Amino acid sequence: MTFDTQQASALLRRMFDAAIAAAQPSLTLARHLPERPKGRTIVIGAGKASAAMAQAFENAWPWALEGLVVTRYGYAVPCERVEIVEAAHPVPDTAGYDAARRMLELVSGLTEDDLVVSLISGGGSALLPLPLAGISLEDKQQINRELLKSGATITEINCVRRHLSAIKGGRLAAACYPARVCNLLLSDVPGDDPIDIASGPTVPDPTSREDALDIVRRYGLEVPTHVMRALESDAAETVKPGDVLLPPIDTTLIATPRMALQAAASVAHEAGLAVHLLGDAIEGNSRDVGLVLGALALESANHQLFPSPCVLMSGGETTVTVRGKGRGGRNVEFLLALALTLRGDTRIHALAGDTDGVDGQEEIAGAIVTPDTLQRAWALGIRPQDALTNNDGHGFFEALGNAVVTGPTFTNVNDFRAILIAP
């Protein structure tokens, strides 16, 4: 079995598309509907997939409902009974701030006969930027930028976000009391912990403000003095498991990274390839992961660690510490480090991309590495190692014509990585 560059790239793209398709709310949400309440049904939500989730819920729910959902600019879909608001991601804006405030108002004054359906997906943290008293939206924007370029894991980033928020860390769930809360979640985080999906607005938080302070100190984040004072105060503490302020909560994951990877694996199997899933929750520095997976790919190609032909697949969320003048992007940074490790091995191709269609802050999902990636770059006068040092993976792959652009995918189950090893 042999693959030329065009065939290998096409197969990898079909796998990526299958992963995205498997995580569409229209396919997964309807099977998890809650019982109809005696009273009102209120739909709330936030995240890159939340509008698509609201549409899927509307289509499956024949009874009365009302609601408010906030999603990323460009990710709105038509809904008849749920208001869809678009806001900025990953750095929040006033549209998200206003939507968060209105969402708290919407769920106030409910009764135990009412039902709140919470549709939460990745990206919801930035889309619900309602800070604690004494902290401004500008403060939140600055802290968000600091967190994104710090190299902190998504779990660490969300811990800080929760403790600076007036709506996350279970606070939105507490506002729903005594109404029943049904969480339908689409996971984009390693480990699928609900508290880390959009920083857990409708689930209790077992972490503490001391945990958040440790993270701020660990990464040397530049945080204004008044924000540090707020983080050190009792007001920063989130709603804990077992708190009497919490209503009855039922939480279901309607799509996860593993489900998406399994769908992609089916495409590879149909093409006659063995699939080795290395994990759906890989974290760490993007370039370090690229070096390690590149070494595994070479060992497989040369010494049959994983007998070829095969595909090495993984998911998770790596991080980029932006020190250069490039635009970052964890998937393209991973791929650039991978290409440098492979050194043009003619048997190995790879694709990595974010299933939400946005790698970092770019409207680009990721990219493809081919055996001639480095050679073509040198021919254009581009030095791959310089591009990596400058955190300029996006510029590098755009110049080669190997960027993967999907447009809005209306889902978000984290990163997808596939390395195809031919005989």
Image: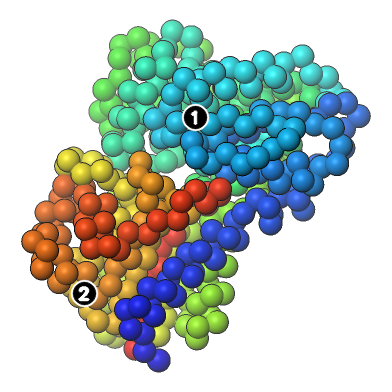
Q: Name the residue type under label 2.
A: Asp
* Tag shown at residue 372: 2
Q: Nearer the viewer, residue 231 or 161?
A: 161
Give residue 386's mark: none
As drawn, 67 above or below 290: above
Which residue position holds label 1?
87
**Quadrant of image for the C terminus:** bottom left
The residue lying at 32 percent from left, 74 percent from top is 349
CA distance separating discs 2 and 1? 40 Å
20 left or right, relative to 222: right
Quarter of the rendering occupied by the N terminus: bottom left
Q: How many marks?
A: 2
Q: Is residue 253 visible?
A: yes
Q: Do residues under tags 2 and 1 come within 8 Å of each other at their CB atoms?
A: no
> Looking at the rendering, which quadrant does residue 314 occupy?
bottom left
Q: Is residue 301 left or right of residue 259?
A: left
For label 2, count other residues whose C-alpha is less than 10 Å away and answer few (under 14), some (14-19) or many (20+): some
| SS of the residue under disc 2 | loop
Q: Is residue 266 above or below residue 221?
A: below
Residue 28: quadrant of the picture:
bottom right
Give coordinates of residue 359: x percent, y percent: 37, 48
In the image, what residue occupies the spot 48% across and 59% down?
280
Q: Residue at x 23, y 41 (%)?
A: 322
| Tag 1: amino acid | Ala
Can residue 281 be seen here? Answer: no
Q: Residues within 10 Å of mark 1 (few under 14, many from 20)?
A: many
